[in-house]
Image: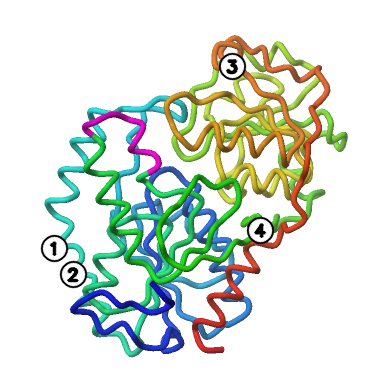
Amino acid sequence: MGPFCTSSGCGRRQSLELSMLIYACISGHGYGHAARTAAVLSTLVGMVPECRVVLSTAVEPAFLRLAMGEAPFELRPCRWDVGVLQADALSLDLAGTLTALEELERWMPAQVEEEARWLETQPTRPLILADVPPNAALLAARLCCPLIWLASFGWESIYRPLGEAFRPWAEQALDSYRQGDLLLRCPLSLPMDWEIPEVEVGLTCSVPRHEPGDVARRLSLPMDRERCVLISFGGLGMALDPQWLELWPDHVFVGVDPRLPEAPNGRLLPPDLRPLDVMPLTARMITKPGYSTFCEAFQQGVGLHVVRREGFAEAPVLERGLREEGWHRVLEEEAFRRGAWELDQPLLPPRAPRESREGSFEAAEILYRLLGR
């Protein structure tokens, strides 16, 4: 397929340069998709202030406001995909995921129609950006609008290894992805055989927005970066035992778990700060495999202590990328849960860090051109 739609019954064989409205369908699976999309779109708004951004997602508005910073946006609270249901950052609920997929399929046509009718009332024709819900293809087809994917994987790659019950959902997702007009392929990616044009971009992430000295004073952090450790497991979180922190009395830990302050060396991250805003003050971070977290840490020079994640196809790909791109150590879940975090061990160096760390700008520049600027 070329840069314009050629599917039967759709008149999308029009220039992609007709729109100054971007409608972004964002996965509600954790925070990583929203963080990546916000990094690109906030950069775009800086380049094209008159661009109107609509975020369509089930991600909490507070997170979106924090991720977008000063870039204005409108919110359409929609759920476009299921992803994989999880009790926490490392565990999967496969039975619950199948039930949720069936429920979503039942009411998706009504949501598509409602959003299409709303978009038809707007004065400008939208360009649809999706990270990375397959159902965005239904909306693009309904409106005959250009559809751009921003992705490091598609749900077909996640569902296929989960068993025969997920195979129809994998095939349905793949068929939807092949209806797009362009793939902005992010690094650390899984295979995406979508048979559409694609452009590779570099690391996509935002930048810290607060002066490090002010953050250090607010959180009573030592100025010795080697003593400060971030703990972050994304939007799904991970329960922490404050006693684990006491095993490392020479370090100060910052994170969002409400029990962190129970330890004398624990600090709770205020709601107006992102983990990224603390990274200039921290030498290491304890986390799970996660695209946006990895990109931010690579960009800021933070060493990663990564807890292995089983059963999710993206995890081994991210681990390989970690060894190529970032200073790191890899922890087993059992070691993490007894506080054996290896903070006294040297970080392992990256084998071949990439040169391009400007993926947010590269993706925004492509969207800028598509918007006709």
Check disc 3 and report the residue beneath it.
332
- Distance from the alpha carbon under mark 3 to that under mark 4: 29 Å
Q: Which residues are magenta?
A: 157-165
Location of the N terminus (image quadrant)? bottom left
**SS label for mark 2:** helix
Residue at image position (49%, 84%) is: 371
Residue 338's quadrant in the figure? top right
Check disc 1 and report the residue beneath it.
110
Task: Out of 151 and 305, give the one closest to the viewer.
Answer: 151
Can you tell which mark lies on residue 202?
4
In the image, is 58 to the left or to the right of 355?
left
Check disc 2 and report the residue beneath it.
114
Hey, what amino acid is under mark 3?
Glu
In the image, is 123 to the left or to the right of 364?
left
Lower position in the chain sequence, tag 3 or tag 4: 4
Task: Out of 99 and 176, give the one closest to the viewer.
Answer: 176
